[in-house]
Image: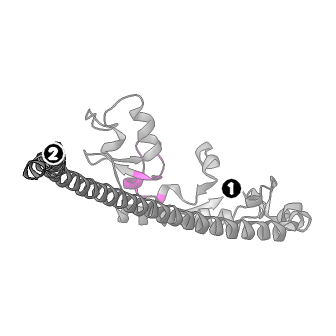
Amino acid sequence: MSTEGIVRGYDFMDASSIDEHVICAICAHPFIDPVVTPCDHTFCKTCIKSWFDKKSECYLCRKGGLSMKALRPANHCMMNILDKILVRCLACEDENIRRGDFADHLENHCLYHPQKCSASDLKCPWVGLRNQAKSHHSACVFETLRPAFEDILTRLHTIEKENKSLRSENNDLKEELMTLEREYNELEGVIKNNEEHGHSRRTGKNVSKSKKSSDYAPERRDKHHHMFSSDDDKDETTRNINTHLPATHEGNANASHKHS
Protein backbone atom coordinates (compact mmCIF):
# COMPACT_ATOMS: atom_id res chain seq x y z
CA MET A 1 0.00 0.00 0.00
CA SER A 2 1.50 3.36 -1.06
CA THR A 3 1.46 6.59 0.89
CA GLU A 4 -0.26 8.21 -2.09
CA GLY A 5 -3.02 5.59 -1.80
CA ILE A 6 -3.60 6.44 1.86
CA VAL A 7 -3.98 10.13 0.96
CA ARG A 8 -6.47 9.27 -1.82
CA GLY A 9 -8.41 6.82 0.35
CA TYR A 10 -8.14 3.99 -2.15
CA ASP A 11 -5.58 1.73 -3.79
CA PHE A 12 -5.64 0.12 -7.24
CA MET A 13 -6.79 -3.44 -7.60
CA ASP A 14 -4.15 -4.20 -10.27
CA ALA A 15 -1.73 -1.34 -10.85
CA SER A 16 0.30 -3.36 -13.38
CA SER A 17 -2.67 -3.63 -15.73
CA ILE A 18 -3.18 0.12 -16.01
CA ASP A 19 -2.38 1.58 -19.43
CA GLU A 20 0.88 3.52 -19.32
CA HIS A 21 -0.68 6.32 -21.41
CA VAL A 22 -2.83 7.31 -18.45
CA ILE A 23 0.09 7.44 -16.00
CA CYS A 24 1.39 10.86 -14.93
CA ALA A 25 5.13 11.28 -15.60
CA ILE A 26 5.51 13.37 -12.45
CA CYS A 27 3.74 11.26 -9.76
CA ALA A 28 3.79 7.88 -11.62
CA HIS A 29 0.08 7.26 -10.86
CA PRO A 30 -3.03 7.38 -13.04
CA PHE A 31 -4.04 10.97 -13.80
CA ILE A 32 -6.24 12.93 -11.42
CA ASP A 33 -7.92 15.95 -13.06
CA PRO A 34 -5.67 15.59 -16.13
CA VAL A 35 -4.67 18.68 -18.15
CA VAL A 36 -2.83 18.96 -21.46
CA THR A 37 0.00 21.37 -22.34
CA PRO A 38 0.30 23.22 -25.69
CA CYS A 39 3.05 20.70 -26.56
CA ASP A 40 0.43 17.90 -26.11
CA HIS A 41 1.74 16.34 -22.88
CA THR A 42 -0.70 15.29 -20.14
CA PHE A 43 -0.20 15.62 -16.38
CA CYS A 44 -2.22 15.65 -13.17
CA LYS A 45 -3.41 19.21 -12.56
CA THR A 46 -1.82 19.45 -9.10
CA CYS A 47 1.42 17.85 -10.31
CA ILE A 48 2.03 20.27 -13.18
CA LYS A 49 1.02 23.23 -11.01
CA SER A 50 3.70 22.29 -8.48
CA TRP A 51 6.19 21.97 -11.34
CA PHE A 52 5.27 25.39 -12.79
CA ASP A 53 5.93 26.91 -9.37
CA LYS A 54 9.57 25.92 -9.95
CA LYS A 55 9.92 26.26 -13.73
CA SER A 56 7.67 27.65 -16.46
CA GLU A 57 8.43 24.83 -18.89
CA CYS A 58 7.07 21.42 -19.84
CA TYR A 59 8.21 18.64 -17.51
CA LEU A 60 8.91 16.32 -20.47
CA CYS A 61 10.06 18.35 -23.48
CA ARG A 62 11.18 21.49 -21.58
CA LYS A 63 9.25 23.86 -23.82
CA GLY A 64 9.38 27.21 -22.04
CA GLY A 65 6.97 30.07 -21.45
CA LEU A 66 4.18 27.87 -20.07
CA SER A 67 1.66 28.60 -17.33
CA MET A 68 -1.59 27.17 -15.99
CA LYS A 69 -3.54 29.49 -18.30
CA ALA A 70 -2.07 27.72 -21.33
CA LEU A 71 -3.39 24.28 -20.27
CA ARG A 72 -6.60 22.61 -21.46
CA PRO A 73 -8.67 19.76 -19.92
CA ALA A 74 -8.09 16.19 -21.17
CA ASN A 75 -10.63 14.76 -23.61
CA HIS A 76 -13.59 12.53 -22.66
CA CYS A 77 -11.92 9.35 -23.86
CA MET A 78 -9.10 9.86 -21.37
CA MET A 79 -11.60 10.58 -18.57
CA ASN A 80 -13.63 7.42 -19.35
CA ILE A 81 -10.52 5.22 -19.18
CA LEU A 82 -9.55 6.72 -15.81
CA ASP A 83 -13.07 6.36 -14.36
CA LYS A 84 -13.16 2.64 -15.19
CA ILE A 85 -10.01 1.78 -13.24
CA LEU A 86 -10.95 -0.54 -10.34
CA VAL A 87 -9.90 0.43 -6.79
CA ARG A 88 -10.19 -0.84 -3.22
CA CYS A 89 -11.45 1.33 -0.34
CA LEU A 90 -8.80 1.58 2.37
CA ALA A 91 -11.37 2.35 5.08
CA CYS A 92 -13.88 -0.50 4.70
CA GLU A 93 -11.80 -2.63 2.31
CA ASP A 94 -14.59 -2.91 -0.25
CA GLU A 95 -13.11 -3.93 -3.60
CA ASN A 96 -13.70 -3.52 -7.32
CA ILE A 97 -15.09 -0.02 -7.00
CA ARG A 98 -14.86 2.06 -10.17
CA ARG A 99 -12.64 5.02 -9.48
CA GLY A 100 -15.26 7.33 -10.98
CA ASP A 101 -17.74 6.08 -8.32
CA PHE A 102 -15.40 6.23 -5.35
CA ALA A 103 -16.62 9.61 -4.07
CA ASP A 104 -20.19 8.27 -3.99
CA HIS A 105 -18.96 5.16 -2.14
CA LEU A 106 -17.39 7.28 0.60
CA GLU A 107 -20.41 9.52 0.93
CA ASN A 108 -23.14 6.90 0.96
CA HIS A 109 -21.75 3.38 1.51
CA CYS A 110 -18.43 3.23 3.37
CA LEU A 111 -19.10 2.34 7.03
CA TYR A 112 -15.75 3.60 8.27
CA HIS A 113 -15.37 6.80 6.38
CA PRO A 114 -15.75 9.84 8.68
CA GLN A 115 -19.22 11.33 8.32
CA LYS A 116 -20.69 14.67 9.29
CA CYS A 117 -23.95 14.88 11.17
CA SER A 118 -27.06 15.24 9.04
CA ALA A 119 -27.66 18.46 10.99
CA SER A 120 -24.30 19.94 9.94
CA ASP A 121 -26.31 22.51 7.95
CA LEU A 122 -27.57 23.68 11.36
CA LYS A 123 -23.96 23.90 12.64
CA CYS A 124 -23.83 20.56 14.46
CA PRO A 125 -20.08 19.90 14.93
CA TRP A 126 -20.29 16.09 15.22
CA VAL A 127 -18.07 13.96 12.96
CA GLY A 128 -17.96 10.14 13.25
CA LEU A 129 -18.22 6.83 11.44
CA ARG A 130 -21.29 5.88 9.45
CA ASN A 131 -22.15 3.04 11.87
CA GLN A 132 -22.20 5.64 14.69
CA ALA A 133 -24.31 8.17 12.85
CA LYS A 134 -27.66 6.52 13.67
CA SER A 135 -27.16 6.64 17.43
CA HIS A 136 -25.94 10.24 17.23
CA HIS A 137 -28.87 11.27 15.07
CA SER A 138 -31.38 10.07 17.70
CA ALA A 139 -29.70 12.22 20.37
CA CYS A 140 -28.64 15.21 18.27
CA VAL A 141 -29.97 18.43 19.81
CA PHE A 142 -29.62 20.27 16.50
CA GLU A 143 -31.72 17.66 14.72
CA THR A 144 -34.37 17.89 17.45
CA LEU A 145 -34.56 21.64 16.92
CA ARG A 146 -34.75 21.33 13.11
CA PRO A 147 -38.55 21.90 12.94
CA ALA A 148 -38.20 25.11 14.95
CA PHE A 149 -35.23 26.22 12.83
CA GLU A 150 -37.12 25.48 9.62
CA ASP A 151 -40.17 27.38 10.88
CA ILE A 152 -37.99 30.37 11.74
CA LEU A 153 -36.28 30.20 8.33
CA THR A 154 -39.65 30.04 6.58
CA ARG A 155 -40.88 33.08 8.48
CA LEU A 156 -37.65 34.92 7.74
CA HIS A 157 -38.03 34.20 4.04
CA THR A 158 -41.61 35.44 4.17
CA ILE A 159 -40.52 38.64 5.95
CA GLU A 160 -37.75 39.15 3.40
CA LYS A 161 -40.25 38.84 0.55
CA GLU A 162 -42.64 41.28 2.26
CA ASN A 163 -39.78 43.66 2.93
CA LYS A 164 -38.72 43.48 -0.71
CA SER A 165 -42.30 44.17 -1.80
CA LEU A 166 -42.53 47.15 0.59
CA ARG A 167 -39.25 48.55 -0.71
CA SER A 168 -40.59 48.27 -4.24
CA GLU A 169 -43.84 50.04 -3.26
CA ASN A 170 -41.83 52.71 -1.45
CA ASN A 171 -39.79 53.35 -4.59
CA ASP A 172 -42.99 53.61 -6.64
CA LEU A 173 -44.42 56.13 -4.15
CA LYS A 174 -41.21 58.17 -4.27
CA GLU A 175 -41.39 58.32 -8.05
CA GLU A 176 -45.07 59.32 -7.89
CA LEU A 177 -44.26 62.05 -5.34
CA MET A 178 -41.48 63.40 -7.55
CA THR A 179 -43.89 63.47 -10.50
CA LEU A 180 -46.48 65.40 -8.44
CA GLU A 181 -43.82 67.87 -7.29
CA ARG A 182 -42.77 68.50 -10.89
CA GLU A 183 -46.39 69.02 -11.94
CA TYR A 184 -46.95 71.37 -8.99
CA ASN A 185 -43.88 73.43 -9.85
CA GLU A 186 -44.93 73.65 -13.49
CA LEU A 187 -48.47 74.75 -12.51
CA GLU A 188 -47.07 77.29 -10.06
CA GLY A 189 -44.89 78.73 -12.82
CA VAL A 190 -47.86 79.02 -15.18
CA ILE A 191 -49.93 80.83 -12.53
CA LYS A 192 -47.06 83.22 -11.81
CA ASN A 193 -46.60 84.01 -15.49
CA ASN A 194 -50.34 84.66 -15.90
CA GLU A 195 -50.35 87.00 -12.90
CA GLU A 196 -47.37 88.97 -14.22
CA HIS A 197 -48.95 89.21 -17.69
CA GLY A 198 -52.27 90.38 -16.23
CA HIS A 199 -50.53 93.04 -14.11
CA SER A 200 -48.70 94.33 -17.15
CA ARG A 201 -51.97 94.71 -19.09
CA ARG A 202 -53.69 96.52 -16.21
CA THR A 203 -50.72 98.88 -15.87
CA GLY A 204 -50.85 99.59 -19.61
CA LYS A 205 -54.54 100.49 -19.44
CA ASN A 206 -53.97 102.87 -16.53
CA VAL A 207 -51.16 104.56 -18.41
CA SER A 208 -53.43 104.99 -21.46
CA LYS A 209 -56.20 106.44 -19.31
CA SER A 210 -53.76 108.85 -17.66
CA LYS A 211 -52.47 109.86 -21.05
CA LYS A 212 -55.97 110.58 -22.34
CA SER A 213 -56.81 112.61 -19.23
CA SER A 214 -53.65 114.66 -19.62
CA ASP A 215 -54.52 115.33 -23.28
CA TYR A 216 -57.92 116.74 -22.35
CA ALA A 217 -56.60 118.80 -19.42
CA PRO A 218 -55.28 121.80 -21.48
CA GLU A 219 -58.60 122.02 -23.35
CA ARG A 220 -60.53 122.08 -20.10
CA ARG A 221 -58.13 124.66 -18.69
CA ASP A 222 -58.54 126.84 -21.79
CA LYS A 223 -62.31 126.53 -21.62
CA HIS A 224 -62.31 127.33 -17.92
CA HIS A 225 -60.04 130.29 -18.52
CA HIS A 226 -62.31 131.49 -21.30
CA MET A 227 -65.28 131.22 -19.03
CA PHE A 228 -63.55 133.29 -16.36
CA SER A 229 -62.43 135.80 -18.98
CA SER A 230 -66.00 136.18 -20.21
CA ASP A 231 -67.22 136.76 -16.68
CA ASP A 232 -64.57 139.45 -16.16
CA ASP A 233 -65.61 141.17 -19.36
CA LYS A 234 -69.23 141.11 -18.22
CA ASP A 235 -68.27 142.63 -14.85
CA GLU A 236 -66.26 145.32 -16.60
CA THR A 237 -69.18 146.19 -18.88
CA THR A 238 -71.51 146.34 -15.92
CA ARG A 239 -69.14 148.64 -14.06
CA ASN A 240 -68.91 150.92 -17.05
CA ILE A 241 -72.67 151.09 -17.36
CA ASN A 242 -73.10 151.86 -13.72
CA THR A 243 -70.46 154.54 -13.97
CA HIS A 244 -72.24 156.29 -16.83
CA LEU A 245 -75.79 155.99 -15.53
CA PRO A 246 -75.76 158.86 -12.98
CA ALA A 247 -74.30 161.27 -15.47
CA THR A 248 -77.01 160.51 -17.98
CA HIS A 249 -79.74 160.86 -15.35
CA GLU A 250 -78.36 164.21 -14.27
CA GLY A 251 -78.15 165.38 -17.82
CA ASN A 252 -81.74 164.45 -18.41
CA ALA A 253 -82.80 166.30 -15.27
CA ASN A 254 -81.03 169.49 -16.37
CA ALA A 255 -82.59 169.25 -19.75
CA SER A 256 -86.02 168.98 -18.28
CA HIS A 257 -85.37 171.91 -16.04
CA LYS A 258 -84.25 174.06 -18.89
CA HIS A 259 -87.19 173.10 -20.91
CA SER A 260 -89.51 174.26 -18.19
Q: Is residue 71 left or right of residue 161?
A: left
Amino acid at the residue labelled 2: Glu
Q: Residue furthest top?
A: 54
Q: Nearer the viewer, mark 1 or mark 2?
A: 2
On screen, 45 above or below 62? below
Splitting the image into 4 quarters, where does residue 78 fall? bottom left
Q: What residue sits 70% from the left and 61% below the top? A: 93
The magenta-colored residue range is: 17-34
* Residue 158 drawn at (x, y percent): 69, 70
- Secondary structure mainly formed by the magenta segment: loop
Q: Circle 2: is it few (<14), some (14-19), or many (20+) Cα within 10 Å?
A: few
Q: Circle 1: is it few (<14), some (14-19), or many (20+) Cα within 10 Å?
A: some
On screen, 225 above or below 97? above
- Upstream in sequence: badge 1 or badge 2: 1
Foreground: 23 or 125?
Answer: 125
Residues at marks 1 and 2, CA–CA distance in whole angstroms: 178 Å
Q: What residue sits 60% from the left and 55% below the top? A: 11
The residue indicated by pointer 2 is: 250
Disc 1, SS: loop
Disc 2, SS: helix
Numbered badge on residue 187: none
* Residue 217 drawn at (x, y percent): 18, 50
Foreground: 32 or 212?
Answer: 212
Splitting the image into 4 quarters, where does residue 147 fall? bottom right
In this orientation, does residue 96 appear? no
Q: What residue sits 31% from the left and 60% below the top? A: 194
The residue indicated by pointer 1 is: 90
Q: Is residue 152 left or right of residue 33?
A: right
